[in-house]
Image (cartoon, rainbow, N blue to C red):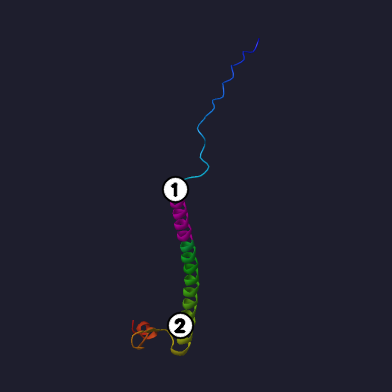
């Protein structure tokens, strides 16, 4: 069976010259938006890094609280401490009274 050749399309030549640059106004708009995007990304990165550092600081504080609680329990036994005035409430007494 013979193949049918499809006719080649003629090339259309655009006589209008193509632009080599965008307008100054468009360039300023693009530059402004890219700059704003970069600033936001930088700030998000800084915020994320700060968040990470704060989580580590919080972990350190929680570890210090745990250590202090152990020290207080060794010295006073099982207690609750009123953090406003330092008054001690002995938990062993409550269990003995029950």
| Residue 29 percent location from the top left of the image | 43, 51
Q: Is residue 26 above or below residue 61?
A: above
Whichever of labels 2 and 1 marks the residue nearer the N terminus, that label is 1
Q: Residue furthest top?
A: 1
**Which structural element holds mark 2?**
helix
User: Of residues 70 and 31, which is closer to you in this image?
Assistant: 31
Q: What segment carries the magenta color?
A: 26-41
On the rendered structure, is 1 left or right of 17? right
The reply, left or right, for residue 83 in relation to residue 54 is left
Rendered position, 58 above or below 29: below
Q: Quadrant of the N terminus?
A: top right
Could you say which is closer to the camera, residue 44 or residue 58? 44
The secondary structure making up most of the magenta span is helix
Q: Nearer the viewer, residue 46 or 13?
A: 13
Where disc 1 sits, the SS reads helix
Q: In the picture, residue 7 is in which quadrant?
A: top right
Residue 84 horizontal side relative to residue 75, left or right: left
**Residue toward you, 70 or 41:** 41
Residue at the far right: name it: 1
Q: Residues within 10 Å of mark 1 (few under 14, many from 20)?
A: few
Give the percent coordinates (x, y) of residue 65.
Answer: 46, 80
Residue found at x 44% / y 55%? 32
Q: Residue at x 48, y 69 (%)?
A: 50
The residue pinned by badge 1 equals 26
Q: Position of residue 47 (x, y in %)?
A: 46, 66
Name the residue carrying label 2.
69
Q: Is residue 88 part of the magenta span, yes or no?
A: no
Please give the name of the residue rendered at 50% of the width and 67% of the height, measured from the top-left corner. Answer: 49
């Amino acid at each position: 069976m013979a193949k049918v050749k499809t006719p080649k399309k003629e090339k259309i030549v655009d006589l209008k010259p193509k632009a080599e640059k965008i307008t100054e106004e468009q360039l300023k708009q693009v530059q402004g938006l890219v700059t704003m995007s970069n600033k936001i990304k930088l700030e998000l990165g800084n915020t994320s890094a700060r968040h990470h550092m704060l989580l580590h600081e919080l972990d350190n504080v929680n570890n210090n609280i745990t250590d202090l609680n152990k020290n207080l329990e060794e010295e006073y036994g099982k207690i609750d401490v009123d953090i406003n005035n330092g008054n001690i409430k002995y938990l062993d007494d409550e269990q003995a009274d029950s």
